[in-house]
Every structure is written in C-alpha cells, then in structure tokens.
Image (cartoon, rainbow, N blue to C red):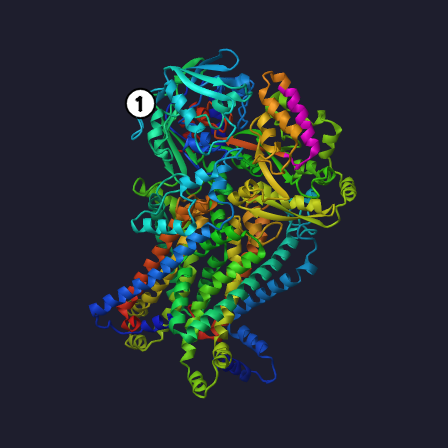
Amino acid sequence: MLDMRGRACFSKGLASVKWSAMQAFIIRRILAVIPTLIFTSVIVFASIRMIPGDVIDLMLAQNDISTGNDRALIEASLGLDKPIYVQYFVWAGNLLQGDLGRSLWQNTPVTEQLAATLPITFELGFLALIVALSVAIPIGIYSAMRQDTAGDYVARSFSLLMLAVPSFWLGTLVMVFPSVWWRWSPPLQYTPFLEDPFGNLAHMMVPAILLGLSLSAVTMRMTRTMMLEVLRQDYIRTARAKGLAEHVVVLRHALRNCLIPVVTLIGLQAPLLIGGAVILEQIFVVPGMGLLLLEAVFQRDYPVVTGVFLVVGVAILAINLLVDLTYGFLDPKVRH
Amino acid sequence: MSDVTASLTATLSGSLAPARHPVVAFHRRLFREKPLGAIGGILFAVFLFCGLFADFLAPFGLNETDMLRRLQSPSWSHWFGTDHLGRDVLSRILFGAQLSVIVGFLAAGLATIISIVLGVVTGYFGGAIDMTIQRFVDAWMTFPDLVLLIVVISIVGPGVPQIVIILGCLYGIAGSRIIRGSVIGIRENMYVHAAQSTGASTPHILIFHILPNVMPVVIVLFTTRVGAVILAEAGLSFLGLGVPPPAPTWGSMLSGTGRTYMYLGPWLALAPGLCLTVVVYAINIYGDALRDLLDPRMRGR
Amino acid sequence: MRVLLLLSVLAGMKVWAETPQYGGDLNVGTVNVTLSPLSWDPADWTWKSNHDTGAAREQLFAGDLDKSIRKGGAYPFIADAYLPTESIRGELAESWSWEGDLTLVINLRRNALFTDRPGVMKARLLEAEDVVFSYNLIDQSPKRIPTYFDHIKNVYARDQHTVVFEFSQYNAEWMYRFGYGYYSGISPRELGKVDRKDWRNVSGTGPFILEKYVQANAHIYTRNDNYWDQETIDGKQYDIPFVDKLIYRIIKDEATYLTALRTGQLDILEAMRWIAVDHLKETTPELKWNRWLGTSGTFLSLRVDQKPFDDVRVRRALNLAVNQKEIVELFYGGHAELMAYPQHPGFGDYFEPLADMPEAVQALFTYNPKKARQLLDEAGVPEGFTFNVQVCSCSPSNMDLIPLLESYLKKVGIQIIIQPMEYASFLSAMTTKTHGPGYLLNSGHVNPITTLRKSFVTGQTWNPSQYSSDYFDEQVRLLHLMRDENERIEVLRALTREILAEAPYIWLPVAYAHTAWWPWVKNYGGELRVGAVRPGPIYGRIWVDEKLKADLGFD
C-alpha cells in the first residue's frame, strides 16, 4: 500500500473527479469500518471484565470489614448481575442513543468524563504533531539534499536517538534537573485553555515537545525517503538544468509532491499520539484520556474503559478515513 | 532470481575468493558502505554476547544483596557501583542484557512468525480471507500499543511468558501489513507466474518463491522489533506492569530504583539508561543499514 | 543572597508577633497525594471519604488543635484514625452527656450553617434531623459493614438541637464509630433527594466548599465565608478559614510531586520517603520538616491454613531469618522502628515497647539464620522449599523491599517467587481468599482495638493469614464491652503479646515518613489528621504569608 502511495507522488496534476464515484468510495469506506467497530467493542467489553478482581470486590474492600456485605444488592444496583451478553446489548442499545453509561464509582456520565479529557489529549497530540512536523520536515529535507554526508548522518542519528530513549526517563530528567539547579520546573498544574491560554500552553509544552520528538523520528525518515525519490525525477533535473536555484527547485516542485505520503503517515501515527501520552500524562500531571483510562482500568470502572476504547477507536478510524479520503481524492488509482 | 540472491551474488562477485560465506561477505560490504550501521552491528553483537554469556561474565549474582555495601559509587570492585540493596550494578546490567535478549528475541521471533503467516496468507490468497483478516488487523491496529498492553497485562498478570506472548502478538499483527504489502508485490513477479503455470503446488510456491523474497523485509522487521520490545517492556515497568522483581530488566532498573534513588546514586539510573539507549539505538541503526543493503525498495517503512 | 534574605526575614519574625493574613491559595499534596477520590457518597462506606470531603463536611467530634504539640499541648495529631479521648473536642456537638448507661444525648451547635449549594439546598442552620438523616443514610446502605452499628438501637431528634442515641449495649469505640471515624460525616437532609455520587452535591457545614473536581488531577475548595468556628492565635480570635482557596493536588509520580514541592507549586507535602529527604534539605533549606512514624504496619502474611505455615516453628523461623535491624538501619536509613505493629507508639499506654516484651517476642526481631534453619529442619521443611509471595505494585517501598526479603530467605534455603499485582487485583486476591501463601501488605493501625480485630479475628477481610482462634475472638469481643480504660489496656497488651509470639506474619519494621512545608505556611506544625483520615479542620486554620512567599522568590 505504501508503495502505491509513493508512486502517486509522481502523478502530475489531478485526475478529473466524478462526484458519484467519490460518494461510492466514501460509503464503501465507512461501511468497511463498521464491522471493525462492532468487533472491537465486543472484545473490549468482554476483556475488561476478565481482569481479576472485579469492581464489587474493590468496592467492598474500601472499609476494614466486609464479610457479609450484600454483594447481590450492589451488583444489582450497578446492573452487573445480568449475564454478560445482556449487559452488552444494553450497553450497545444505549450507545446508539448517545449514552455511554455511567462510572460505576462516581455515577458521572462517561460522555461527560470523555468530554472533559478528550480535548486535553487532542491538544497534547496536536501540539506534539506541530513539534514533530517542525522538527522532522526540515531535517528530512536537509538530510535528503545532503544525502550520505556527515550532516545526514547526524540528523538521522538524532532522530533515532529520540526513538531510543524511553519517554519516562527523558521526562523525568527534564522535570527534575532544572528544579534542582534553578528551582524552576515546567508548571505542573493544568489550567483550561479558555481560562488561561498561556498557563495552559506552558503546562502542556514540555510533554508535547517530548511526545513530538519521539514521533518526529519516523516522520523524518519518511520525509527523507520521499524527498530522495522526488529529487531523482526527471522534472526536477529539468528544473535544475534550467538553472533554477536549488531552494526554488525544492520548494516549488519537490515539496508539494511529497507531503501527501507524509500526511498519510501522520494519520497512521494517531495511535502513538494517544497511547504514547499515557506515560507523559502521568509524569506531567496532564488530566487527559490516557490517565483516565489507566485509572479506570485500575479501578475496574468498566463503562469508562469501554467508553474510552470506543472513542479512541472511532477517533483513529475517523482520522484514517479522512486521510484515505484525501488520498483517494488526489489519486483516482487508489479508489478502485 | 530472487532479490536476495541477486544482492548476495553482487557481494560475492566483488570478492576475490569465491568460497566465502555469504553472511560474512555481506557484512564486509556493510562495513565498507555503511560504517554507522556497522558500528550498530558491532554494538548489537556485544549486546548479544553479554546476554548469552552473562552467567560467566557477571562477577556477582543478580540478587546478591549485601546491605553493608549498598549505594557505593563506581569503584574497582564494583565497576558500576552498587544499588540500594548492595547488589552489584554491573552484574545486574549483564543479567538484564540476558533478559532483554531472551524477551526481545522471543517476542520478536513470535512477532515475525505471526507476521509471516498472516502476511503471506492474506497477501498471496487475497479475496475473502484477506478481507476478513484485514478487518481484524484494522481493529487491532486502531488501538495504541500501550493501552492494549495495560489491559491485557492486567488480565493475565505480569511475567516473562505473558509479556513475550503479548508483545509478540501485538507486533506480529501490526507487522503483517508490511509483509502483506511485500507479498502482493512479489506475487506479480514473473517467476511466480511461471511457476504457477507449470503447475507447481501452492505450498511449493509459498516456500520456494514467496518466502525467500520476503526474507529481507523479515530480517529488518525482526531486528527493529527486538529494540521495540525492549522499549515496550521499559514503558510497562514504569506503570508497574513489567517483569516482576528481582528480575533486572533495564527498564525496571531505570524506572524504579533509578528514579527513586537518583539523588543518592546517579549511577543507578545512568547505567541502565545508557545501556538501553545505546542498544536500542544500535539495533535501529543496524536495521536501517540492513534495509538499505538488502532491499532498497523498503526505505521509509 | 537568598540566605541573607531568609535570615533577615526570620530575624524580623522573631521581633514582632505575627498577625494572620487573609487570602491566598493553599496547595497541598496530602498523605494520599497519588490517589483520586473513589466516591463522594457517604453511603458508599469508602475509607477515604473524610479525606476527600472532610474540608466541607463536618462531624460530631474532632481533634482539638489547641492541644497540639505546636501550641504547647501533648498531641501530634498524626494517627490516621485514632484520637486519645482527652484530645477530642466537640465539633458539631457542643456538649454531650449520658442519661443512664445506654442513652447518649448530644447537644448540637446552634450556629453551624450549611452553605448554599445550587441544586441541593439554600443555606440554613444545622438541625438534629440532619444528624439523624446522616446516620440512617449510612446505616441503611447496602455497602455497610454489617456489625458496625450493632451497638446502637435507635437514633432520633429530641428537639431541633438535640440528638439522642439509644444504645443496646456499650461499645468502647462509640466515639470513633459515629463521631470522629471514617463514616461519620454530617450531611444535610436535602442530600436524600439528589444524586449523592455527584461531587457537585457535596454539602456541609465545614470551612470550605467543594468548588471543582478535575478528575485524577485536583480538588479545588473555596472558602466558606459563613463558617461558624473561630481560631485563637496569640490570644485574639479570628474568623476562619484564612485562605481563599484550598487545592488538593493529585500527583501520581513521586519524582513529580517532589519537584512540585521544590519549586513551590506545593505548599505542603505531607508524606515522602526518607530517600529524598537529605537531598531536599540540601537543595531547599528553607523547608520546615516533621518526621512521623507511619500509621500502617508492614508485614509478610503467611497463610496459617496451609502447610507448612500452620506450624508455629516455621513462622518463627522465617522471622528469625529476616534481619529486621538491618532493614531499619540500612534499608530505611535509620528512619524506621523495629516494632510498631500491631500497636502504634501513638496509642499511648496501649502500646508496649519491644524492650518490655517477653523473650519469645523479642527473639522474633533478632537475626539468627542458623536457628531459623534448625527450626525449619525440625518442622520438616526441606531446603529449596518454594512459595509465592504477592506484593502490590502500588507500593514502591514494598516493591523495593521484597527482593531483600527474597535474599534473606534464600540464605536459609527458602525460595520465594515474587508476584507483583496492581492494587485492585492485589486487594481482590485477599478478599476472595485466593492469595498467598505469602502476602506483603501494609495495613492501617486505625486504633488499638481495631488493629487487632481486623487482622486477627476469624474471617475478617483484612486477616490475610486466616488466623483463627476462638479465644482471641472472644477476648476482642469482650474488649469492646469494657468501659474501664485501664482494664482495656491490660487485656489489649496481653493479646498483643500473644499474637506477636504466634507470628502469623513475618513482622517487619515500620518506616517513618516526612512532612515538609514552606515557611510561608503559618499556624501549622505538620499535623495530619483530626479525625479518621480527616485533615480539613487543619487546613481551615492555616494562613499563608504572601509577603514571605514573595520575598523567597515565589509569586
């Protein structure tokens, strides 16, 4: 698949677009996603209940005697006494009405918890993406243009280094050492963006940078590869032969054609942005979805876990769909 | 001729003495054309060596506590110092290498087998099998690695076999996509068509035509997976779900005692941190070089 | 430069008495800084309820901070759920008396005010019916502890400000169980009609109002301007609370909360391990410190209902095999006590020091691997005997300790297999009795009687060793009925001695923890609780010296 997308980089000009063909394509893609979603929801629903130590045990263990508590009553009040397939259909039915259930501990609607945490994770991911792109693309282009020179090696080494250092370690170093040497650390307190934009960004910047750097490694490599392929093409040689300045060649011709696969790659990195954030969220006290999920798993809050998985799944599938659509729009060969 | 044999022939024809082992010759080419990758390879080999012979190389046991010796900085008797329980850090690093080799290779191996099976089957046969399995792979790949790991390890509990199997499945399914892409390309190769038209059986084609041509991809995938597994275990141990103590995985040494005691003993974090970074980095550089030499078409994966 | 500034400020402070200032924020990393609230509903019977809501919800009784050591009294207010009788004052109870042996009459304060709570209630005074409601709410909950209120027959309001408790029998813990204990919060009657699980409906008479809860991140409380109580400082009376905002920060990572303290983002950090203390004292000399003995026992429980741990020789041998003194001096850097469980030194006369204990008990805290191996041989345990030990990955200290225990036991030919589990799995293994044979646990002391009851009475959830003795059960039952404190002390001490000698656990040292706070936090001396896990009233009396804070370089 990536091969085909790479070749699309060389297509000169857009093919003519027929709207009905596009519609069919969209519908087909969406239909393809639905079985995946259902399949996934079943697995997630079942698997979280397989973790040893169920939520009732945990609730009963909250005080120092719990012999004789009426387990059945508590189970019934939480709707956990019905067989699992009944629970699933109840959940799925509610889901279709927009109700993801309520937290077993605090009775807050899961939708509310997700509405509180999803934007934060998205913001972190978005900032990380900006960092990743601003680091990866220039370095990738530079690396391609100076292929196999010392500069290329240094650039590639740097990006691989970012991949090799565990995020929790880098995060700890960045947070602890400035605090010891200069009594300064990045703010460890979350403020909503609308309340205090600067405070919010100051808080999220450091984890975003760390997340972005680890993302940039793969992106940089991709950019470099694509750039290399493009630079070898005839029309580039022609442009050079015409006497155009190097940076004009790069910017006007090569860059435009290479961003498509790079953007595609970004879409594929979406899981990393969400999952990779879990560790950084813990270290930098970011109340995002990763931390919500971790807590919910540890507290056996089934509706929250299922809700988070579903939303993550939908978000990532939506991103991939969008990327595919953009791609299909630009290259009719893919649409068959 | 398959691409692998093509590249090996190219290598062989470059050397004066024809009767040289292809792997050795290949590595000579590596040294000549990709020096950085070669360094990565050397470090990788050192890592392997330490891992395999840790029992002989380590001066102390992996859980040999001696509270009177605790938290000593590096010295002649303890090259990397001692930790909070008086255990020799160098020995623990060596045994950690052993664990990383075991977990890394086993998990990467399992992942590779799964990737090959899934990738070849879906890539070669296509059709309904491809569609259904791809839906399953789609579902699997929708989820962030760490999130899946957290849930699964919570279910089965931490431990070496569990981690190997889970990481193996995780990377195996994700990697099958890449192999599938490769197989689709190979399928259209004219040698395969020739074999099919002469009535060769499917297993024959799979084993003698498809598989050898997928090997370069497999080799590179395997190498990079080893690094990925080591890092994944480090992330898990930070969250408390890694290999249980007193196992000296570099990840748990770094995330646990390394961070707790960093004020009292920076060497406790420096040693596993450096080893982790250097080894994963070396593996990736080596994998990059392998890829460049074996199958330039794979660049950018 | 900073040091000069500090010295001059300190000198200035000594010259004139400090006048409390109003305003500012107080950011606290509490004892449970890594834990999020599990439930806001009193009917859920969660132990953490007072910690989460105790700044807003008050109780009948609480510790009297005027008797704290800082103010010249005798009480440190550290114990997590125990208050010596003389240190207690009436919080919402203005006075109380007994009518006959079994009727308790409590007169409530007349000026305690429930705050406005949108969607729940308008502000009004506390009434006796609220107390009755609060009691019935928890007594009738499906999650209640079955025998907890067996001693109470009936609760009713005699008039608007008087509550009557009719006892069916005396219980020595009465003041704890519905007074200053875990499940004693007084909520308004209106709570019966709203969703109690919603944090927005948390209502009370306390010094603070729960303004916002950001999941897994922070609880934000704002000042209750109409709070009924006052604080006396240097002879003058002040309305409290002083600070505008009280924020409990939830920070899961140790390195992060230490950094937050170091950079002034936390004003108080209530509990940290000894490891970071020296370095913190070096880099941040302005901090003030308090060291306190942990309020939970650490032990490795052995399942006495499984062979070979049913043989007391085996259990004693394992105690001899572990070098507890070395753990105190070297693992905890000297910041630990050899024996502080089941009784805690903070329990006053209930606690008997190790040196006064009989030989059989003292021996368990010595290191004698030869004798250990001898006992094991006698009991028929072979060399290389292996058993599983579960440990919670939620306790970094225990995770650090267990490889050391493995090493000690290996030296006497016993091999343990370490199984870390995360909190819920770990707990559930115990509640479903599928744990063991070894189980490394921290168990709260609570109070002198409960510490024995919860851990050693037959069938109790927090009795991981499954220890069962009819005699012990009966003695504990009788303890609850004794009115005479001296009698209780004697019986309790005897029971403690016996259980220690029985060694159902490998007894392990109890570590000290440290509290640190910045000098701009005033009217505070490191006190932790004035009720069961209840710090609210302490924070209500703290004031922040903004000028000092600015002088030290923090805005």
Residues C187 and A316: in front is C187
- Say which quadrant the C terminus of chain C sits in: top left
- Give the answer, above or below, for where A291 lies relative to C550: below
Secondary structure of the residue carrying tag 1 is loop
Q: Is C508 one of the magenta-colored residues?
A: yes
> Which residue appears at 48% of the width and 28% of the height?
C182
Residues B257 and B217: in front is B217
Count of picture labels? 1
Judged left or right of residue C434, residue C36 is left
- Give the answer, above or below, for where C265 lies relative to C63: below
Q: Is C351 one of the magenta-colored residues?
A: no
Q: Residue C408: x percent and y percent?
A: 70, 44
The amino acid pointed to by label 1 is: Ala
Q: Residue A55: x percent and y percent?
A: 47, 43
Is residue C294 visible to the viewer in this orientation of the structure?
no
The residue wearing badge 1 is C123
- Give the answer, above or below, for where A328 lies relative to C234: below
Q: Residue B152: x percent and y percent?
A: 49, 54
Q: Tell me which chain the residue with mark 1 is part of.
A: C
The part of the image, by quadrant, that contains residue B190 is bottom left
Within 10 Å of disc 1 (Cα), the crowding (few <14, some 14-19, many 20+) is some
The part of the image, by quadrant, that contains residue B43 is bottom right
> Which residue appears at 44% of the width and 50% of the height?
A278
- Give the answer, above or below, for where A234 lies relative to A69: below
Q: Main secondary structure of the magenta part?
A: helix
Is residue B273 visible to the viewer in this orientation of the structure?
yes
Q: Residue C12: x percent and y percent?
A: 46, 21
* Extent of the magenta region: C488-509
